[in-house]
Image (cartoon, helix red, strand yellow):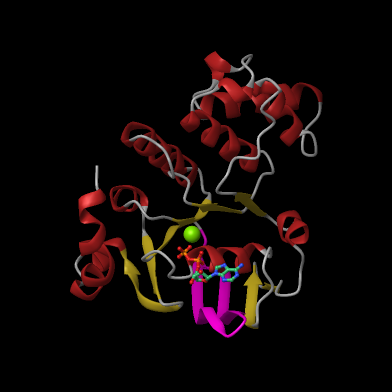
Amino acid sequence: MSTLLKATGVSKHFGGHAAVSDVDLSVNQGEIHCLIGPNGAGKSTLFKLVVGTHEVSSGQIEFMGKDVTRERPYQRVKQGMSIKMQTPSIFKELPVRQNIHIALQHHARGADLAREEDRLLDLLDLTRDATKLAGVLAHGQQQWLEIGMALALKPVLLLMDEPTAGLSPEETFKTGELIQKLNAEGMTVLVVEHDMAFIRQIAQRVTVLHFGKVFAEGSIADIISDPRVAEIYLGKTEHHEH
Ligand code: ADP
Ligand code: MG
């Protein structure tokens, strides 16, 4: 199995505080990899180091065998990373289809573009709402549209920070199904997530962060059965499960 993303000894300090401390992370091609941990564990900071919106204090990040540690986010996107941010950055005043159209423009023209628009709208279950303004969609649908815009860039690696934040249990489950469908088509996915039901639904490999360090790593089965993890994380959040 080949490694798509590899962070080695990555740290990020804010003033004197180490939000991320000497973290190694490997994401294998074709896997759904979840990054979990208690609030403040450093998940979002590590995510930002990977996508390049934060610069590392030390350490190295390789993507597809190339050192991207000093590259800007747009350069990483060009090489195949695509990011769904925590707050949707869709064009709310434009129709749903137009949003997808704009995102696809760099990759397709004419009939190809129209075909790809239809395919993505269908995948996101937004065909019926294609002519509606994006701003009137339900919160979950806006999140899926945002995922669709990230997919329009034809990424090699799809990165998401808490894609289920604010979603209902039904919307969360549907998001999981969407991610599994993408993965079945070959997409590698790195997801920062808090919702344990969702992690159980989608995760193949899991990295647990705690106080900015890797606390545990393994298959979803390993992590669920690890009492140390339950103590710091699962036990605490069990009552949040839907
Ligand atoms: P998580 O996503 O796991 O909840 P974060 O990565 O957001 O955790 O935060 C990890 C730690 O780093 C927290 O203590 C947080 O307060 C701190 N932190 C995050 N971003 C910044 C920042 N821009 N400036 C200062 N401290 C930050
Ligand atoms: Mg976070």
Magenta: main secondary structure equals strand
What range is drawn magenta here?
1-29
Is residue 48 or residue 113 the one in the foreground? 48
Whether residue 4 is visible, yes or no, is no
Residue at 39% x, 42% y: name it.
176
Residue at 79% x, 33% y: name it.
105
Residue 108 lies, in percent from the top left, at 77, 33
Q: Is residue 19 magenta?
A: yes
| Image vertical order of residue 242 relative to residue 67, above or below | above
Residue at 26% x, 57% y: name it.
237
Whether residue 196 is visible, yes or no, is yes
Residue 157 lies, in percent from the top left, at 59, 55
| Image vertical order of residue 102 relative to residue 80, above or below | above
Q: Is residue 100 magenta?
A: no
Residue 103 lies, in percent from the top left, at 72, 36
Q: Quadrant of residue 69?
A: bottom right
Q: Quadrant of residue 169?
A: top left
Number of dots carrying numbers: 0
Q: Is residue 30 left or right of residue 103?
A: left
Q: Is residue 99 left or right of residue 228?
A: right
The residue lying furthest to the front in this view is: 15
Is residue 65 or residue 125 the one in the foreground? 125
Image quadrant where one finds the C terminus? top left
Residue 3 lies, in percent from the top left, at 54, 69
Residue at 68% x, 55% y: name it.
80
